[in-house]
Every structure is written in C-alpha cells, then in structure tokens.
Image (tube, grey):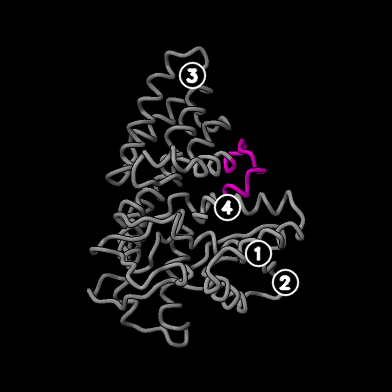
Amino acid sequence: MRRPDGDEQVAVHEYCAAKLARYAHEDVGDNLLEGRIRISAFLLQAEGGAENFNVKMMSYFLGLRKDMPATQVRGLGTLAFDGRQITGRPGFLTSFFNPDDTRGAPGRAFRHKTAWHNIRTLINGIMARYTPARIKDIVDNLRGRLDPKIDAEARSVLERAPASADRNVLWLALVLNSSRANLWLGPARENISINTTGSHLHRWTEDLDDGELDLLEYRNKIQGAQFGPGKATEVQQMILRILDEAARQFDPLTYAINRIKDEAISRLDIDLRNEGEHAAAPHHKEIYKIAQGIGNLELYPQIIDGLLGL
C-alpha cells in the first residue's frame, strides 16, 4: 500500500481534528506533530486509558461512524515539566465553565484568543526570570481571587503529576489555559486551519530571517500554500501585499520580516472575535511581543489579570 504523502497526512489530520475539536472544547494542537499526540491522548483519555480503549472510538476517529460521546479533554493532557520549562498542552478545567456553556452548533468549538503556545512562552519566561518563591506568590495571590472550585480542581489534577514537577508552574499553566475570559465560540474548522497555517508561517518566516530562504522563495511558498478558508486565507493575502510593498523599500528583507511578524502572523496568534477587542484588551498584543522576544515581561501581573478577566 502506498504511504500517504505529507499533504495527504495534513488533510487527514485536519479532517479528524475538526471532528474532535467539536467535542474537545478547543483546538487539538499547534502543529501537525502536536496534533497527532493530542488526538491520541484525547482518544485514550476519553475511554479511560489504553486498557479500556474502545474500538468504536477509533472507528469514529477514522470516519467510519458518525456518533461519538460528547466528552472533554481534561486533566494534564500532554502538559509536562522538564525541570527548566513546561512543554505540551493541558486539558481544560471544567470549573471555569458554567452549566449552560455550550459549543453551539456542530462544527463550533472554544477558541483561544491568545494562543496556548504563547501563554506557555509567557510562563516559561516568568520561570526563567523569577525565583520559585515569586512564582508561589503569584499563584497564592490568584488562589485568593479566583473561585475556590477552580483551585480545588487544579489541585486534584496535579495529584497525577510527577513528584519532580513544579506544582505552582503547572497550576499556573492549567488555570491560564482554561480561562473563560480568553476563550470564545467560533468555527472549529477555521480554528484548526489557523493553527496549521500559523505553524507553517512561523517556520517559513524564521527561515527567511535566518537566510535559509530568500524573498522570492518565501513568496513562492506563501503563494502556493493551500491554506484553509477564513482568517488563514486573509493572512496569506496580507503577506503577499506586504511582500509587494517590501519590493519598493530600501531594505526589503527587514521591512518584510518586521511587518509580517507584527501585522500578519500576529492575527493568527491573537484570534479575537472581532478586531475591536484589541483596544480593550492590550494584554494579547503584549503576550505576542513577549513570545517574539521584544515584550516587557515585567508586565506579567497585568497580563495574567487580563487573561483571567480579573
């Protein structure tokens, strides 16, 4: 049997992920590899572990049946702590959601306004700069201001974390990932498309910045990419316009890279219901800047409050 090529694998991944996202309350990964890991974790966890794995669940994953239990990805998910930083992504804490919270019509899911991978970069930056005692103070302060049910659920989840993991750091990751103030209901398929597109654009733009690609090669990749509908296609067209304008500048490369990162890719990493939210919620842009290495990490108290809606 012929092995599927890369494009076919991406297409199958997006098809399956879009189905699962409807039930998972979120996207399933920031890139193809993480998405595969996330889907596997979701399927296993939904059935209570490998020993209880149900053939019906796998049949649904393969598109061989239409029905699937409406379950949520909970717990630690793929979140891990390697002694220096956190990796992976957590499941949702259900205590953030009201009983009447809904995914809406089929094909809709909760979408992060600020992408999880940038929240993860923020937390890792805080770990690198501040002492464990400072991080404990951050967590203790939040515990006193959040619903006690949230803290109780996070503590319960962390009972399953390895003994060597920093409980305060993992607590912060669980809570910030689940914040209802940083989520909105939107089309699940567009959400998957945004993540896939963002992964490609980040990599290609870094290759451009490092000299692995020249501007013509970069343009050809952008122009030839088959991104999904909605915001991903809008960003694709925006980058092509920026490249046209860059050709008329004194330093086309620097002009293109700066504008693409600041104006185009940021629209994928900051996924707002409408652009008017930017003015009312500046913490989203500040987190993006921190992820790019140009933000002010000392603003973390205001940023965390903004993510949590405090």
- Give the numbered dot on residue 304: 4
Q: Which residue is drawn at 47% across and 51% down?
A: 115
Distance of label 1 from label 3 (alpha carbons) = 41 Å
User: Which label's residue is closer to the chain start, 3 or 2?
Assistant: 2
Element assignment for label 2: loop
User: Which label's residue is closer to the chain start, 4 or 2?
Assistant: 2
Q: Which residue is drawn at 48% across and 63% down?
A: 178
- Residue of label 3: 252
Amino acid at the residue labelled 4: Ile
Boundaries of the magenta span: 290-304
- Residue of label 1: 81
Element assignment for label 4: helix
Neighbours of disc 2 within 10 Å: few (<14), some (14-19), many (20+): few
- Residue of label 2: 164
User: Which label's residue is closer to the chain start, 1 or 3?
Assistant: 1
- Give the numbered dot on residue 48: none
Q: Are marks 1 and 2 in contact (CB under 8 Å)?
A: yes
Residue 235 in the image, given as x and y percentages of width and height:
36, 36
